[in-house]
Amino acid sequence: MTKDNVQGAGEEEQQAQSKKALKKQQKEAEKAAKKAEKQAKLAAEQQEADEDDFAKDRYGICPMVQSQQKLDRALVRVQDLTPEKAEQQIWVRARIHTSRAKGKQCFLVLRHQQFTVQALLAVGDRASKQMVKFAANLTKESIIDVEAVVKKVEQKIESCSQQDVELHVERIFVISQSEARLPLQLEDAVRPEGEGDEEGRATVNQDTRLDNRVIDLRTTTSQAIFRLQSGVCQLFRDTLINKGFVEIQTPKIISVFRAEDSNTHRHLTEFVGLDIEMAFNYHYHEVIDSITDTMVQIFKGLRDRFQTEIQMVNKQYPSEPFKFLEPTLRLEYKEAVAMLKAAGVEMGDEEDLSTPNEKLLGRLVKDKYDTDFYVLDKYPLAVRPFYTMPDPNNPKYSNSYDMFMRGEEILSGAQRVHDAQLLTERAMHHGIDLEKIKAYIDSFRYGAPPHAGGGIGLERVTMLYLGLHNVRQTSMFPRDPKRLTP
Amino acid sequence: MTKDNVQGAGEEEQQAQSKKALKKQQKEAEKAAKKAEKQAKLAAEQQEADEDDFAKDRYGICPMVQSQQKLDRALVRVQDLTPEKAEQQIWVRARIHTSRAKGKQCFLVLRHQQFTVQALLAVGDRASKQMVKFAANLTKESIIDVEAVVKKVEQKIESCSQQDVELHVERIFVISQSEARLPLQLEDAVRPEGEGDEEGRATVNQDTRLDNRVIDLRTTTSQAIFRLQSGVCQLFRDTLINKGFVEIQTPKIISVFRAEDSNTHRHLTEFVGLDIEMAFNYHYHEVIDSITDTMVQIFKGLRDRFQTEIQMVNKQYPSEPFKFLEPTLRLEYKEAVAMLKAAGVEMGDEEDLSTPNEKLLGRLVKDKYDTDFYVLDKYPLAVRPFYTMPDPNNPKYSNSYDMFMRGEEILSGAQRVHDAQLLTERAMHHGIDLEKIKAYIDSFRYGAPPHAGGGIGLERVTMLYLGLHNVRQTSMFPRDPKRLTP
């Protein structure tokens, strides 16, 4: 693409565009033109240099991969670079994680996903002075293909995931160039908060992270978080499918939305809900038992299969291992209120738990029962939605429950009213327009089994299992009242 | 709940409610009152009858299951009622599927999920005249608990899924009553369309089905459809997790939505997308191969694990078994146009496929290659979105593809432009406001691997695998321009 092409396209569209957009486009075009100029200059320099460069065919910038050809060349993954591959000549595709030139040598750390390996270029038989200079000038985060010989190292390379080998590079080609100025540095983005202060080094604040989420997602911490979250989904579904559940997809476009306060560390405008609904025979505790067993299977699966990811996150955000009991601890709301009152909290018996009280309760429960996971059962009827089944023995309470991880709610659930008449009565009591929920009420008119369920907040489970402190860390592209992009 | 209670609650809320809502509420209250009156009358009648009824404790209407008690009583599932259980005394919870009184006997067909069993009450030692009458008067779709002895039968019961046994009922209690007038009959809802016409019997039209989806979902056909759909999701994810993919959750709240014509048999306002994105090394066909292999794993899994469900759906909607090749057939767009032209279609080389031509092509491909699944590769650049990678060898074409099942598109995909500069140029060419897609373009500025992907329409895969003809059958609660409920 040349400068002329870009301007030509601009003219065609000019009439349909606002002035502002046009300005932007001109700016883009100028930027593109500058880039093209710079590349032309580089090319000219290189041509000049090429004339006396024996290695000129061993490095360079590839044309954009546009599927021009089907190359029969195997690429080895960084994670597979182990001593078993020593002395082998291989090709690797990876990002430049860090780069350091030192005399006639250039050290690169290459990264793919959460794995890193050291690579070395040295002026000699296989690399010219120009080639080493070329490598040293490559921008961080660029993606390159290198041909190299795998070499065992005598001293472990502590800064890389692949500690026993390094790559001696013989060819190096750029697949995708990164802009030179990164909006954040990956090494800053994984630095534990305290450590940065002490050593006068930078850490990255949350808005910068989220504004540049595409880069932030490349850190070992982010890679570990989202791999573990994928594991939560998988464990949740596998456990339930084994129990005979069927996965269903419900509509998201509905006429009534529930608005929540999203300006907190644990609320998002949009979150992923893993929901369970289950018919039971006699008592909704059958459903509580199914849900808690599912959660326990998730905790065990994470502990047994995702220990590497847990350790990676702990490096930046240290936390105690997640503790849980079998069977799961179940407390009644009344008992919780009594525990809080005994700890000096003033609150009414039928008052909802404030966030600080919820957290305090979590600490009291942890001290007394040594668990990070428990169920709080039998909430006051007044603080639950209209479709919650009242307690048959005490009209002030209800057959409803929340589940907590590290003192924060991750699931809210209840026995649902399955009788159209009682449901109508409860909706009227709550001042709800019956016309708006007609389809919902009518669905119970033709025989409905007693049932209960609950909704699990996926981002919260990931956050709290890992002992993180903001749900935006466990949402890939979080949405809140102030953020609709990227 | 009494009539007084309902009106009392009405008064409290009166001020906050519109007149219309109040009218509705009064209607509801009157309805509830009538129901209460009727129940009182029934109770009086029963009390009278009880006086000379030796079986009076063996039947009745249970109070609403409000988790009053934890009963230590095992319930046997209908699907587990086999000859091995013969002569055992058991409890079963199920719906009344059909009911037929005959002299001193009452035959019920009991249903749980997609399974049915015959149950018999006969006046004698274990059941009184009143008890049989009570059973005969129960409304269809009500949920009941029965205690019964399992009996082997000499002649197979063709009308039930459990053909070798029947239940001799000794106790019968109602758990949840259905209203007497059902908006649709389940036996009508599973009748093959032609058959209804021939025998002068009713079938159920689609709007009635969808207006009463809660009942329509109880048919064996619906049960089979959604169990198979759950299987599609499971097979899709298991296959990809095994290939090393990570499941991610993307935001649904974004600033730009793409509107599609939803007034067709295969478009919904809301659908479930199973999306894949994958970095590749040299050629986007690496991604096509991964996706087609995933589809083949899904087809095989459905064929091997969901044969019962496929047969159930075929009973109502007969179709040929789904055929596929290994490796998957891949045609170029040019070839498809040539096939269509040879079949008499007039169309331009760079024209998009119309729906009739798409279907015709499906038939031509089936005739020639004997497959219901194939890939159409190298679409004209002009008919694809701006982020599609142009073909490096011919600027009129692109590195993009659709996949088809039984002649209808189920996936659209492409190599994506991974270069910010080319992406900007392409967006400008399409007259797109760059400001609105800034975050998207910027995400490619810091090194991006060549990648391709595609979005699979879950409802379409289910519909076309089963040879169904409307995507609303495979969406649990479909949304289109005319439907926002239930």
Image: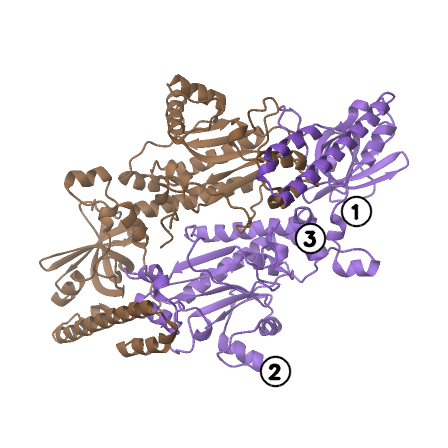
Chain colours: A purple, B brown
Q: In terms of secondary structure, where does tag 3 sit? A: helix
- Residue carrying label 1: A158
Q: Which amino acid does label 2 sit on?
A: Gly
Q: In terms of secondary structure, where does tag 2 sit? A: loop
Q: Nearer the viewer, mark 3 or mark 1?
A: 3
Camera-nearest residue between A466 and B416: B416
Q: Which residue lies furthest to the right in this view?
A: A103
Q: Which residue lies furthest to the top in this view?
A: B342
User: Label 1 is found on which chain of the structure?
Assistant: A
- Residue carrying label 3: A209
Classify residue A35 as left or right of residue B226: right
User: Label 3 is found on which chain of the structure?
Assistant: A
Asked if residue A99 can be seen in this view, the reply is yes
Q: Where is residue A129 in the image (x, y as percent from the top left)?
A: 87, 29
> Tag on residue A344?
2
For marks 1 and 2, the one nearer the N-term is 1
> CA–CA distance between discs 3 and 1?
26 Å
Q: In terms of secondary structure, where does tag 1 sit? A: loop
Let me know if marks 1 and 2 both belong to one chain: yes
Q: Is residue B209 above or below residue B302?
A: below
Q: Where is residue A479 in the image (x, y as percent from the top left)?
A: 58, 55
Camera-nearest residue between A31 and A220: A31
Marks 3,2: beta carbons within 8 A? no
